Amino acid sequence: QVLAAIQAGDAAAMKPLLNATNQEKVSDDEIAQYLKRKKGTIGDVTKVTEVRESSREGQVMAKIRVEGDEVFVVVLTLEEGQYRFEDINSPAVADYEAQPIVAP
């Protein structure tokens, strides 16, 4: 859902997918601007290929794609039993692969 909202540039669809902190701090206009910037980052990817634990408790990293020595990931935070969008990050491949796989 997150990648689809980014692809479509749909701030209204993205807002309920945000974690609580982002929902409180980020305006609709800021969401729209963020989606425009990140659409290039995710390319034409519409599904993640695997999910790994993050080094931060309560977060996971959903793999989007690899470019060079970086892995582009969607960072999701567990809130009230559901994973919510935190950010898109690009850890080093070695750092990413050092984390346990949660889902293929």
Image: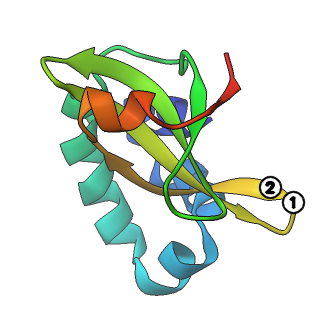
Image point (38%, 40%), residue name: 9
Q: How far apart are marks 2 and 1 (CA)?
A: 4 Å
Residue 82: which disc? 2
Quarter of the view holding residue 103: top right
> How would you rate the neighbour count of disc 1 (Cα within 10 Å): few for under 14, some for 14-19, many for 20 or more?
few
* Type of amino acid under label 1: Gly
Q: Kindly state the secondary structure of the residue where label 1 is placed.
A: loop
Q: Are marks 2 and 1 in contact (CB under 8 Å)?
A: yes
Residue 24 in picture, x, y percent from top left: 53, 85
Residue 81 in picture, x, y percent from top left: 87, 60
Quarter of the view holding residue 84: bottom right
Q: Left of 73 or right of it: where is 56?
A: right
Residue 63: which disc? none
* Type of amino acid under label 2: Gln
Q: On the rendered image, what quadrant is the N terminus found in?
A: top right
- Residue hosting label 1: 81
Image point (58%, 21%), residue name: 50
Q: Left of 84 or right of it: where is 99?
A: left
Image point (33%, 38%), residue name: 95
